[in-house]
Image (cartoon, rainbow, N blue to C red):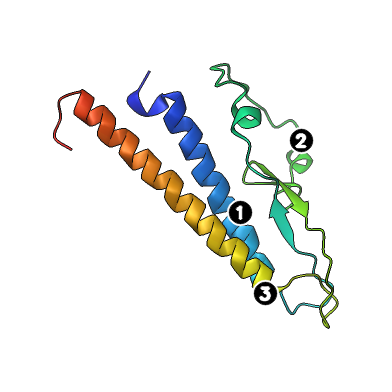
Amino acid sequence: MGLLDMPVFSALTDKMRWHQTRQSLLAENVANAETPGYTGRDLAQYDFARRHGAFSTASVTTSVTQPLHFSAGGAGVGGFDAQRMANFEITPEGNGVTLEDEMMKVTTNLMEYQAATTLYQKSIKIIRTALGKQA
């Protein structure tokens, strides 16, 4: 098992991918804030326990039997479940995207991503120190 295959690193890597995917969806929402009829999307909240199943090492592979059975823009975005946002406010354009709300989500997502990357870096430094390497 490689050093970066440890459960803590795979969990942090998955969390960072989730934040990257969410950032893309939030950017789409901001870009389409004035598009008539556009419905914003967001990812389901990230859950370590559900995503990793107690860090099982079992793997599942898929095979494509019919290329049209997989869609790129469907519910699964980047391996995560995208969901339509519950909109309580409809803008004059007829969509439910509020720029203020989306920008708050973008900022929160950025801060959580930075926290995950900092934790990743600190974990690497701890392991390097334990191995007697200079950090």
Q: Nearer the viewer, residue 17 or 115?
A: 115
Instruction: From the image, tell me which residue sits under label 1.
Output: 22
Instruction: From the image, tell me which residue sits under label 3.
Output: 99
Residue type, numbered disc 2: Gln
Residue 80's place in the image compared with 9, above or below, is: below
The percent coordinates of residue 114 (x first, y second) are: 43, 52
**Which quadrant holds residue 27?**
bottom right
Q: Quadrant of the N terminus?
A: top left
The Cα atoms of the two marked residues, 3 and 1, are separated by 16 Å
Instruction: From the image, tell me which residue sits under label 2.
Output: 66
The Cα atoms of the two marked residues, 2 and 1, are separated by 28 Å
Residue type, numbered disc 1: Arg
Between discs 3 and 1, the one toward the N terminus: 1
Residue positioned 35% across, 22% down in the render: 2
Residue positioned 74% across, 80% down in the render: 34
Residue positioned 33% across, 34% down in the render: 123
Residue positioned 82% across, 73% down in the render: 95
Where disc 3 sits, the SS reads helix
Q: Nearer the viewer, residue 72 or 41?
A: 41
The percent coordinates of residue 124 (x first, y second) are: 30, 34
Between discs 2 and 1, the one toward the N terminus: 1
